[in-house]
Amino acid sequence: SKSSKKGVILGQGGELHQQTVNTEETLTTQQGVPVADDQNSLRAGPRGPTLLEDQVMREKIFHFDHERIPERVVHARGYGAHGYFETYESLTDLTCADIFQRKGERTPVFVRFSTVAGNKGSADLPRDVRGFAVKFYTKEGNWDLVGNNIPVFFIQDAIKFPDLVHAAKQEPDRGFPQAQTAHDNFWDFISLTPESMNMIMWTMSDRAIPRSFRFMEGFGVHTFRFVNGGGKSTFVKFHWKPKQGLQSVVWNEALKINGADPDFHRRDLWDAITMGDYPEWELGLQVFDEIFAEKFDFDVLDATKIIPEEEIPVKVVGRLVLDRVVDNFFAETEQVAFCTQNIVPGIDHSDDPLLQGRNFSYLDTQLKRLGSPNFTHIPVNAPKCPMHHFQQDGHMAMHNPKGRANYEPNSWGKEGGPRENPVKGFISYGASVNGPKTRARSETFADHYSQARQFYISQTPIEQKHIGDALMFELSKVEREEIRERVVSHLLNIDDELAKRVARGLGLDKLPKPADAAKPTQKNLPA
Ligand code: HEM
């Protein structure tokens, strides 16, 4: 081709097209071959069929055809940013986690906020829980705190998660709604799952329509363990407190915003960070021991319960600052893989059955979503500390073991590659485990209403009104009367006035009987 002075070039066939101007870099194929003409396919004559040998077009279309990967099965719609975590004080007495050893130390982080139920292209402001996932790139490996903006969860046991999510997402026959919880399947499931009642109070509250990601709290939800250098363990719950304050929109605003700008939350985060108004959260801890756990009214392993801050105050130990947007949305925000199993020495799991199930689920789903066990080689997922192991091969392997040895023990001495380190290495806390194999749930998980009531009565009158309004709005979209009645039967165990107001609003002829509180799961089905 010959270039004209105006930046217009003539293709091999003599046709005119625009040239990319003012660029230093030559466009190449993925093989690095300079491209002369990116506008016209190779044809047999100017009006003839395209030739199969056109390797430039073939490569370009081939790659485009494979651009999509499966969206996350939940939390598909999200937005991420980089930043750092700064430790306020050394927590050596509580944990040997390297990140908490030195006052003032900064650790790089990547955070992804998300909605839960909506598909990747859904709007930012449905009534929904928000994900608040933090990856800390610590000097002793990656620690992921994969939390939400609500401190409790719908279910106590991970085996119910697929049902919860199926019921919450679009209905299988019609493929809608994409993002709202207001539909029969969701409320049918909820009305048959009394353990969800505390979470329902939270999700019907203003917390489920946050003003933006910057104005949300975050919670690790489960009880975790800290383990100190002496091997002593303490239970811990993690909290994120936004320095911007906690703010929500009201439902009318949410509906209008979704219509006017479905990207409202991602735009808000992008704008704040690019303008230098970096959002900040403080990390708070609720720390307690076995003695407190024993005497607490609820089970600390039950993720549908909080530990009231009046009983165990939140101690602030550091801050999180988000100060850098991603270079590329797909490479970072889409490909990031958080996993509750990613813990570091000094932090450990508890026996919470929801957490135990999550530990299995994330790795499994990410293999499917990212397509190769080597997704830890993607820069956003790779640790920023030295890393040596013998895992090898598989699709897209970028860091295979170097040298002769790819197994251990081996007798290759210094050339034998990495060795175990019984002193610095991760050692699971040696909690005693005992008991018969059983699917029976502990009695300590049985009270589904007290904390729902506590949450409701802790709200201001206007916040209580919003909860009632939300329940009426949501349930008014539910066609089957018996589902509405069943929800009201649970509300009667939470707050009489609230139940009556919702029943009136829904035009129920008479109040149903309160749900049977003594026999929790699956026992409230109509006779
Ligand atoms: C994704 C939080 C319960 C399975 C996520 C994400 C968050 C989150 C924040 C999005 C991560 C991101 O931004 O990439 C929570 C919380 C839970 C909970 C706080 C309860 C306390 C569960 C349970 C399961 C589960 C019980 C399964 C048994 C998943 C899966 C993904 C996910 C499969 C998609 C992960 C991916 O594709 O990368 N969760 N989740 N979650 N969660 Fe959960």
Image (cartoon, grey):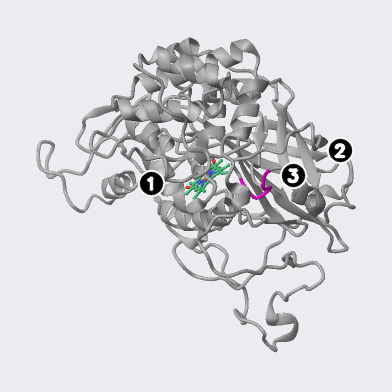
Q: For the N terminus, which image quadrant?
A: top left
The residue singled out by tag 1 in the image is 70
The residue singled out by tag 2 in the image is 88
* Mark 1 Cα shell of 10 Å, populated few (<14), some (14-19), many (≥20): few
Give the residue type that dot 1 points to. Pro
Magenta region, residue range: 298-302
Q: CA distance from mark 1 to mark 3?
A: 42 Å
In reply to whether residue 480 is colored magenta, the answer given is no
Spot occupied by residue 371 in the image (x, y as percentages of width and height): 42, 56
Give the residue type that dot 3 points to. Phe
Secondary structure, mark 3, is: loop
Labels 1 and 3 touching (C-beta < 8 A): no
Comparing 73 with 309, the one in front is: 309
Q: CA distance from mark 2 to mark 1?
A: 40 Å
Please identify the quarter of the rendering in which residue 476 is found.
Answer: top left
Comparing 1 with 519, the one in front is: 519
Q: Is residue 83 left or right of residue 399?
A: right
Q: Is residue 219 left or right of residue 11?
A: right
